[in-house]
Every structure is written in structure tokens, then in C-alpha cells.
Image (spheres, grey):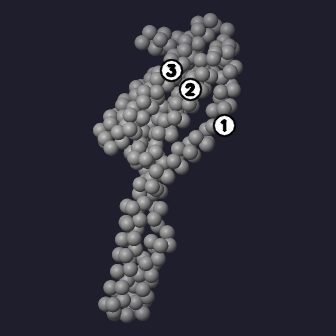
Amino acid sequence: MNADSKAIIGKLLLKPLDWLTLSPFVVGATLGMGAWAVNLDSGVATAASVILMLASAGIYLQRLILGWEGNYEEAVNEWVDSIEGKREKELDLLYTELAQDGDPRTENLLKDLRTLTKALMSERSGAMALNSLDIVADVDKLFRKSVDYLRETLDLWRMAGEMERKTIKEQLLQHREMLIGEVEKSLENLGAVLGSMKKAAVNSRDGNQLAELREDLASRLRIAEEVERKMQDLRYARDNDEEEYLRYADKCRTH
């Protein structure tokens, strides 16, 4: 379970804790403490105190269980909406900046990524919402990684434009092409996930399909993380050792 899932579960566990649930507990605890304070040795007071506190626990569990499905779907929707709201302006700015490189691929990739991700985020109604939080979180992770790559292609394009040495300029542009290629793969992955989610939504009672979808997406993320480790090594070589960067970039390109 990832951090987002834990946060939402924690929020759901706290949701039934209002005056309706806590009032019997407070009254029972007050009664028990009052009897103890005045040294009242009364079985009736003790029993009443325990019964009220147990009633409070019963009300909590009943409201938690009966309201779980609706509250879970509401919490997932709120979480997704908060993600989308925070990044829309930032992505609009990035789209404008990508127009500077004269390469329509980067702008189109960002546009397609946003369209696909919105479609994926909307596939969370009904029974799917109860089972797809981890899937949605992984989709968001893959989307953010792709956006970071697009942002880096812009940095590499600018850096290459400032380079006098031809070999470094060429390697920077090759590195940029590698990143564009990875974003294209991520776009294909997200498209495949969307198709699988729609299929799982039609057969939402089949838990096996959701489990297969989670494993498929986890596998795609593992591949993306392996690529990211190679990219980090390439960035380190670029920033610290020019000759090593040339060798490492050539090695990455041939693999």
C-alpha cells in the first residue's frame, strides 16, 4: 500500500468520529470517572459507563462499515481532483515552453499524455473506485515521470544550443531523443492501461482482472524505473565528466 492509499484509509477511519459516535463514549467515561472521583462503589454506575462506551464503539463500527463504500469513492474522487487541480497551470506553462524547441512532437506528447491521463482518472466510478486507488496512483506516477522527461528535453535542447563542441551538442540531442522515445513508450503504456481498465470496469466483479491490471502496471513502472536509473547515471556523467558522458551516452544509445 503506497502513501496515498494510507492517507486515504486514515481519513476514512476518522470520518465516523463525530458527536454522534463520541457522545455515548464521553458520557460513559464521564460517568465512570465521576463515580471514581467521589469513591462511589456502585456496580450500576460502572456497568452504565461500560455499556455507553461499548455503544459508542458499536456505532463507530456500524457507521464505518455501512458508509465505507460511499466514503471511499468520495475520498478517491477528492484525491484525484486535488492532483488535477494542482498541476493544470504548471502543465499549461510547460506546453507553452515546449513550443520554443520547434519540435511539435514534444507538445503533442504532452497533449496526448494529459488527455489519456484524464481518461484514466475518470475510470473510477462504481465498483472500480473501490479497487483502483493503487492503479490510479501508479498512473499518476507514470504521468509525472513522463512530464519530467518532457521538461528535461527542453533543458537539453537549450543546452545543446549553447554548446560549441559538436560532439557534446550531438550527444545532448541524442539524449533528448532517448527521452522523447521513453515518453512515447509511456504514452503507449497508458493507452494499454486505459483499455485494460475499461475491460475491468465492464467485468468489475472479476477480481482477477483487477489483479492482472495492477501487476501489468507495476511491471511497466519497474521498466520505467530501470530506465530512470540509466538516465540518472547519464545525467551524472554529463554534469561531472565530459568524456565519460560521451562514452555512456553512446552505450545507452546502442542498447
Q: Which comes sooner in the sequence, label 2 or label 1?
A: 1
Q: Quadrant of the image for the N terminus?
A: top left
- Inspect the image, locate mark 3, and give the three-letter code of the amino acid beneath it: Glu
In the rendered view, tell whether residue 58 sits above or below residue 239: below
Nearest the viewer among 243 and 169 is 169
Q: Is residue 85 rendered to the left or right of residue 189?
A: right
- Check whether the beta carbons of the residues at disc 2 and disc 3 lie within 8 A of each other: no
CA gap, disc 3 to disc 1?
23 Å
For residue 184, the mark is 3
Name which residue lies at 39% across and 70% down: 59
Residue for point 36% across, 42% down = 204
Foreground pick, 236 / 191: 191
- Residue 199: horizontal and vertical position, in percent? 38, 34
Q: From the viewer's perspective, is residue 231 above or below residue 214? A: above
**What number is the disc on residue 89?**
1
Q: Earlier in the sequence, mark 2 or mark 3?
A: 2
In the rendered image, residue 251, in percent from the top left (x then y), is placed at 45, 11
Q: Nearer the viewer, mark 2 or mark 3?
A: 2
Who comes first in sequence, dot 3 or dot 1? Answer: 1
Q: In which quarter of the image is residue 202?
A: top left
- Hey, what amino acid is under mark 1? Lys
Residue depicted at x 47% and y 11%: 253
Question: What x and y, as percent, mark residue 118?
Answer: 54, 35
Query: Answer yes or no: do the residues labelled 3 and 1 have beta carbons within 8 Å?
Result: no
Foreground pick, 242 / 221? 221
Q: Mark 2 points at which residue?
A: 112
Q: Can residue 231 be seen in this view?
A: no
Give the image quarter of residue 170.
Answer: top right
Residue at 56%, 26% (x, y): give it: 112
Quarter holding the C terminus is top left
Mark 3: secondary structure? helix
